[in-house]
Amino acid sequence: CASSGAFAALKSDGSVVTWGNPRRGGNSSSAQACLRADVTHLFSTAGAFAALRRCGAVAAWGNTARGGDAEAEGAALSSGVQQIYSTSGAFAAVKFQGSVVAWGDPERGGDIKGVQEHLATGVQHIYTAFAAFAAVTSSGSIVTWGDPGKGGDSTSVRSELATGVRQICSTEEAFAALKEDGSIVTWGCAQLGGDSSEVRDQLAGGVTCLCASSGAFAVMKEDGCIVSWGHPDMGDDSTVLE
């Protein structure tokens, strides 16, 4: 596993070894007692690491502003964690009952106070962009948080994301959701795919597949045609297929 300046290796005996820039997770001495055994998975942001242990507890280290300090959430992360997701500067952990615990840079998803009541139970999966999270709940609705301009604010399409979401993809700063009726909903940075208004009619239904580059989205429809939008240098122009 790697941050932007360090590595962490999970050994077969469940211990962890780290090296690289100490300010980006290369020095794990602060969490060493938790990394000697029973670690099952490693996760990273740009400057920190998080280890998930067999007992469901989490240990974090590295740049405190990028998720390397989880002490404030210590009790919530001491057991019951199933999975961890990360943006460039924050972590989000899903616990057994589907609740979410987040820590790290508030502007990159480390603060869930504004949506905490919607993340108390039933979260099944979390998708990530550079600075935002999008959680899918058991009802098929979407809850987002993080940088508002980079996918963390989906209030403009809240009603469309209330139910029936089948899949989500992300560019660096935008999300696109494929719904069960074959339509597409987008939000986030307009230049990187958050604005699909120019192809809205083509995305109203019949979409079977959705994928993304770092700055553009592309879908395949039932008739085999491709529709794309986003940054022109990152895959927006699919006219070559015509």
Image: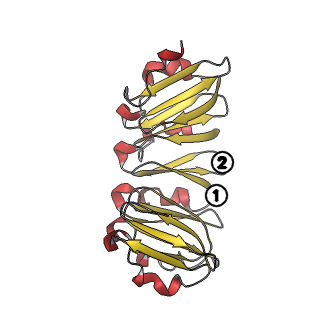
What residue lies at 31% left-to-right and 71% top-to-bottom? Answer: 23
Please name the residue that numbered disc 2 is placed on: 139
Q: Residue at x 41, y 36 (%)?
A: 215
**Label placed on residue 79:** none
- Residue 146's place in the image compared with 100, above or below, is above
**Above-or-below relation of 36 to 93:** below
The answer to whether one can see residue 47 in this image is yes
| Secondary structure beneath label 2 | loop
Instruction: Locate residue 30: give its quadrant.
Output: bottom left
Disc nearer the start of the sequence (2/1): 1
Residue at point 45%, 75% (across, down): 18
Q: Which residue is mark 1?
A: 122
The amino acid at mark 1 is Gly
Name the residue nearer the viewer: 28 or 196.
28
Residue 171 x/y as whole percent: 45, 40
In what element is the residue under mark 1? loop
Q: Are marks 2 and 1 in contact (CB under 8 Å)?
A: yes
Residue 61 x, y percent position in the rendering: 41, 75
Q: Position of residue 76 (x, y in %)?
A: 53, 75
Instruction: Tell me if residue 143 comes above or below residue 175 in the rendering.
Output: below
